[in-house]
Image: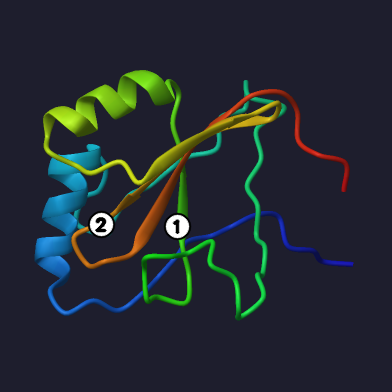
Amino acid sequence: MAKVTGLGGIFYKVADPEATRAWYQETLGIGGEWGAVFPWQADEAEAYSLFSPFKVATDYFDPSAAGFMVNLRVDDLDAFLVGLKAKGVDILGTQYEEYGKFAWIMDCDGIKIELWQQIGPAPAA
C-alpha cells in the first residue's frame, strides 16, 4: 500500500509575502523564490520531522494568534541564538531536554517559530 513518506512543506497566507521572504532570508538565513528548501540528508539516519496536533486551548503557541507554529531544525542552537540576538531578535525562551535544545522567537508576521537542535534518536513510533 502507498504511504506518506514525510513532510512536503508548510504553506500559509501572509499580508506581504515578499517582506516575509526577506525577513526569513535576512534573519534566519533561509529561503528563496519558493521559500526555504530543506533536502533530506541521507547521512542523518536518526533525523526526523514531527507532525503533531495540539488541543485548541494550548498556550504553547503563545504569544502568536496563529493556529500553528513552525519548528525549524538548527545545528547549533546556542550559536544560532547569539546571531539572532545580534540582529535584535527577541528570544522568548529556551528549554533543554534529553532529546533536544529548544528556543522560541516570533517572525515578522507574528508567527511563533520554534528552533530545535536534535539530541539523540527519534522517539519510538
| Residue in the image at 75% along x and 28% along y | 121
Q: Position of residue 18 (x, y in %)?
A: 11, 65
Residue where numbered disc 2 is placed:
107
Pick whichever, 42 or 115, lies toward us. Answer: 115
| Residue name at image x 65 percent, y 60 percent | 51
State the residue position of label 1.
Answer: 70
Of the pair 124 and 33, the residue shown nearer to us? 124
Residue occupying image coordinates x 62% and y 27%: 42
Give the image location of residue 24, x and y in percent: 21, 49
Q: How many marks?
A: 2
| Amino acid type assigned to the residue bearing label 1 in the image | Val
Compared with 44, 112 (above or below) is below
Which quadrant, please, contains the N terminus?
bottom right
- Answer with mark 1 or mark 2, whichever residue precedes in sequence: 1
Front-lying residue, 17 or 34: 17
Q: Which mark is on residue 6?
A: none
Name the spot of residue 96 as percent of width and height, x first.
58, 29
Q: Determine the image quadrant of residue 26.
A: top left
| Label 1 element class | strand
Q: Residues within 10 Å of mark 2 (few under 14, many from 20)?
A: some
Q: Are marks 1 and 2 in contact (CB under 8 Å)?
A: yes
Q: Work out how far the residue at label 1 is from the one at label 2, CA to CA, in angstroms.
A: 10 Å
Which residue is located at x 45 percent, y 57 percent?
Answer: 70
